[in-house]
Amino acid sequence: MPLPRFSRNAALVIARLVAKHDLFERPTERPRTPPLAPRASPTADTLLAAAGSAASGAGRAVAASTRAVAAVKGENSATARPAEGCRPVDLAGLRRALAPNGKPLVVNHWASWCDPCVDELPRLVRAAAGVAEIGEFMGLSWDLFDHPGDPVQVAARVAAFADSAGVGYASVLFVGEPAELFKELGLDSELIPQTVVYAPDGTVAWKKNGVIEHDDVFPLIAAVKRAAGVA
């Protein structure tokens, strides 16, 4: 029996809302909840359990983030991209982290509270391994946008979360306002995840607004190779 018009319209609205929230996350669109709490699923539960139990990894992340406080306060102007873990950065620190250094740089905008971001991490890890000799990867965490807190503590949790997911590249945690980040990087989307490939001269060589799917891994690797001049 066909559904009444009201039921069909209600089902359509619900489907659109579900699609919107499954594909992207927008800062402030969720109610404030404790950070690092993705939607319950086997993958998310496994990651969170590993992050909670990996005391040694979390300890290393805390130490790395503590050392990074100087960068946030502008006391370590020579610091560029982080070598490991996650460190909080202000606008000036972000500029240093993104400064060209002769290699292509892949920047993945993500947050630990963003389920699509967590889902794509294994594919980003594959891509990073495929260009390890010619390019660099860096995460740019939006964790503070939806869950304000102490930057050092949040950065430590982000680092532990990434470590438990097998992410081998470092992240920076932006401590400024979202609008500052969007304006500074000229972002045409205020949603995550999104991934940008910067050529060695700092220009944008490739980008993807939305989840990196399996079919995106090869184009991402190819873009890095082209930017490095080895394609």
Image (cartoon, rainbow, N blue to C red):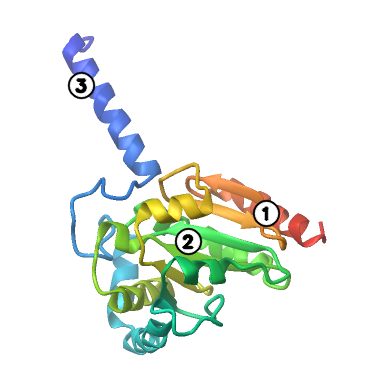
Residue at (48, 48) in percent of width and height: 211
Callout 2–callout 3 Cβ contact below 8 Å: no
Q: Is residue 48 above or below residue 226?
A: below
Q: Between tags 2 and 1, which lies in front?
A: 1
SS label for mark 2: helix
Q: Could you say which disc has been placed on residue 24 in the image?
A: none
Label total for image: 3
Q: Between tags 1 and 3, which lies in front?
A: 1
Percent coordinates x, y for residue 221 in the rendering: 68, 57
Quadrant assignment, res 197: bottom right
Callout 2–callout 1 Cβ contact below 8 Å: no
Spatial CA span between label 2 and label 3: 34 Å
- Tell me the kind of residue under disc 1: Thr
What residue is disc 3 on? 10
Q: Is residue 208 above or below residue 90?
A: above
What residue is disc 1 on? 203
Q: Neighbour class for label 1 at 10 Å: few (<14), some, many (≥20)?
A: few
What residue is disc 2 on? 121
Spatial CA span between label 1 and label 3: 45 Å
Q: Earlier in the sequence, mark 2 or mark 3?
A: 3
Percent coordinates x, y for residue 139 in the rendering: 49, 65
